[in-house]
Image: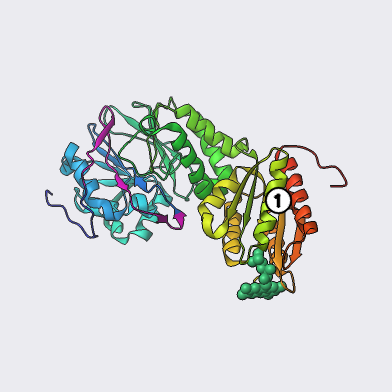
Amino acid sequence: MSKIEFTGSEVLTAHLPAVEVKKDVYWVGSVHEDIRSFHGYETRDGTSYNAYFIKDEFPTVIDSVKREFAGEFIERIKSVCPLSEIKYVISNHAEYDHASAIPILMKNLDPEVPIVTNKKGQDALVRNYPSLADCKFLILKPKETLTIGKRTLSFLATPLVHWPESQFTYSEYDEILFSMDVFGQHIASGKRFDDEYGWERVKESAIEYYANIVACYRLQTARALKLTAKLGKIDMICCAHGLIIRSHVDEMIKLYQSFTDGSIYRPKVTVVYDTFYHSTEAMARAIQEGAQSIGAEVMRIKASVGGTTQVARHCFDSKATAWGSPTLNSGMHTEVAGVLHYAKGLKILEKKPSVSFGSYGWTPGGTKVMVQELESCKSDVIETIDCNWRPTEEILKRCFDAGIKLGKLALGQELKDEE
Ligand SMILES: Cc1cc2nc3c(=O)[nH]c(=O)nc-3n(C[C@H](O)[C@H](O)[C@H](O)COP(=O)(O)O)c2cc1C
């Protein structure tokens, strides 16, 4: 039992110690400083995979890390408890970044140690990591609890926030919510807590995370928040990415409530576009100036430069958007098509007004395809502006006026009939 078996490549940078986040509760995760693309999410601040260990009569591990970091994860657990004493491994979420080191951990534990999860969790774990089929599972039904000594852990099914098996684990004794991806942020840091890193930066990263990962599951998130409110006191949120929340628990829960009830939406217009030869860009600038002229906040993003992550983050809390593309082979610029398709999947344009615009050479196909896509996003397209080659003063004036309209709608003002 003392020999550690590795079946994947491991990064042995165990320079960070296990961190006691509350008496006998430890962070044993890993920090991935140099990751810049996480299944397409642009993680410019890196990320962390937060796993936890509870020292009690029946020592318990909660979640794991990316397989590449299994070595340091196991070393951190060993620094606080011999592996032979571990009695339970809880899996709250079967995704690779939190579960792919579980098979390596299990190979180093007593074969009688069960993986504690729900039925969908078992299915997802065994399908993704076939060697786990040989492990024992303790499948929890709704409302079942697990006593590990002084602590009785309870579990909250949070289906589709953001995978079918997703669940929270709650320790009433510690007043800790182990919330897997929910409330997480893609931040790599040697700091472990929100107050050490700075709440404003944690908050901004949590908004970006929700917009890019969870936004399409708004109703399921609202339900999870409702059920969370019925748990006991929460003094600390041990999420699976980024900083642990101990000084801004209420603020973080209120932030998530603002995501689900829409109160996060701001008087802001996000203008997304791309261009070959600057005509569509000139139109985008005119729309920006129009919206700004009446006091709306504007974020103008060139799709190929800003990228999908920033587009999603800013469309998410904007009350209105504008989309611009030159016509390319009778359709949209590929970068604009890509980010619009991404926004559609995230459902972040629903019930929001939009304007479609773009330059063409001979037949305006870009905006035509774009309007179809915006309508399938359930966005209310209030105007389409096509421009043949270079924009004239008249076209730029139309764009400026369209910016004013979007700005007014973002500011909650009514449009007059003639507008
Ligand atoms: C590779 C390529 C394909 C194009 N395909 C079309 C087309 O199918 N239909 C069209 O009307 N214009 C087409 N155009 C012309 C552009 O839409 C036109 O140059 C437009 O003014 C470019 O706008 P921009 O200055 O914002 O890049 C194409 C241009 C390029 C470079």
Query: What residue type is disc 1 on?
Result: Ile
Q: Where is residue 277, by image quadrant?
A: bottom right
Q: Which residues are magenta?
A: 14-41
Residue at the limit of the structure toward the right, as seen here: 418
In the image, residue 360 sits, relative to residue 376, either above or below, namely: below
Q: Is residue 265 left or right of residue 34?
A: right
Residue at the limit of the structure toward the front, as seen here: 393
> Which one is in front, 240 or 354?
354
Residue at x 51% of width, y 49% of height: 212
**What kind of colouring is applied to the model shown?**
rainbow
Q: Is residue 204 left or right of residue 150?
A: right
Residue at x 78% of width, y 53% of height: 397
- Count how many numbered circles sit on residues in the image: 1
Residue 102 located within the stretch drawn in magenta: no
Q: Position of residue 67 (x, y in %)?
A: 29, 55
- Inspect this view and state whether residue 226 appears: no
Please, what secondary structure does the residue beneath circle 1 have? helix
Q: Position of residue 161 (x, y in %)?
A: 49, 45
Q: Quadrant of ligand 1?
A: bottom right
Residue at the limit of the structure toward the left, as seen here: 2
In the image, residue 406 sits, relative to residue 37, either above or below, namely: above
In the image, residue 169 sits, relative to residue 349, either above or below, namely: above
Q: Position of residue 322 (x, y in %)?
A: 68, 52
- Inspect this view and state whether residue 35 appears: yes
Q: Is residue 271 left or right of residue 25?
A: right
Residue at x 23% of width, y 33% of height: 55
Q: Which residue is mark 1?
A: 287
Q: Position of residue 313 (x, y in %)?
A: 54, 47
> Which one is in front, 62 or 377?
377
Residue 23 located within the stretch drawn in magenta: yes
CA neighbours of label 1 inside 10 A, class few (<14), some (14 to 19), many (20+): many
